[in-house]
Image: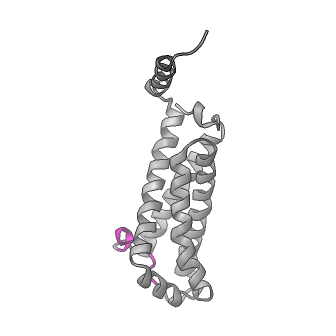
Amino acid sequence: MALMKSDILTDDMARWKHKPDRRTLTVEIISVLLMLLFGLTAIDKAVQFERFYTELGKSPFLMDYQGWVAWGTPIVEAIVVFLLIYGGTPQLWGLYASVFLMSLFTGYIYLLLNYSYYTPCLCSAALESLTWEQHLAFNFLFLALAITATALREGQPTHKNNKP
């Protein structure tokens, strides 16, 4: 028996009406939070590129890599956002990348706080009002969220069509 277009649409709509379980919902909420964080900071770094580039040149740990970091950071953050949006296996890759980036950013702030003579402000406008200790706590929170979502997502189906 041949499937009609209306049968396919009905099956597709039924899949989206399915109420996601807590695990899936948690992963999706954390993914949205990570998308907001990386998306907003990527846009902020791109819009204020000269400022970001200049501050990188003052960093005792990054001045030798100023150009690479200035161009690469917003590009990588944007790629992570698109991976998280896509779902399926790309979403899992985006979560792994989120853990990696948040580990790097958190480690960088820790190094600045404990081993640097100068702490340049490379934050997005939304985080500039935080102290360095608060920013470190913020990063630890988002690192914990990224790790949690990655652990929860690893046990889920990776094919995009299996996503509720």
Q: Is residue 80 left or right of residue 46?
A: right
* Depth order, front residue of 31/146: 31
Q: On screen, 124 above or below 3?
A: below
Q: Which residue sits at x=46%, y=18%?
A: 6
Q: Using the image, determine if residue 72 lies above or below residue 92.
A: below
Q: Pick the quarter of the image with the N terminus.
A: top right
Q: Is residue 89 above or below residue 161?
A: below
Residue 63: x %, y % from top left: 58, 88
User: Which residue is situated farthest in the top direction here?
Assistant: 1
The one of 157 and 123 positioned closer to us in this rendering: 157
**Left or right relative to 56: residue 92:** right
Nearer to me, 11 or 56: 11
In the rendered image, residue 53, in percent from the top left (x then y), is placed at 48, 84
The answer to whether residue 27 shows anywhere in this view is yes
**Which residue lies at the image location 39% right of the left edge and 74% below the top edge?**
47
Residue pictured at 55% horizontal, 58% vertical: 80
Q: Is residue 9 magenta?
A: no
Q: Which residues are magenta?
A: 119-128
- From where the camera sits, is residue 115 visible? no
Q: Of helix, strand and loop, which mostly describes the magenta segment? A: loop
Quadrant of the rendered structure where residue 75 is? bottom right
The one of 155 and 65 positioned closer to us in this rendering: 65
- Coloring applied to the structure: one colour
In the shown orientation, is residue 128 left or right of residue 95?
left
Task: Give the residue at x 65% y 38%.
Answer: 158
Residue 95 x %, y %: 59, 52
Q: Position of residue 87 (x, y in %)?
A: 56, 43
Total residue callouts? 0
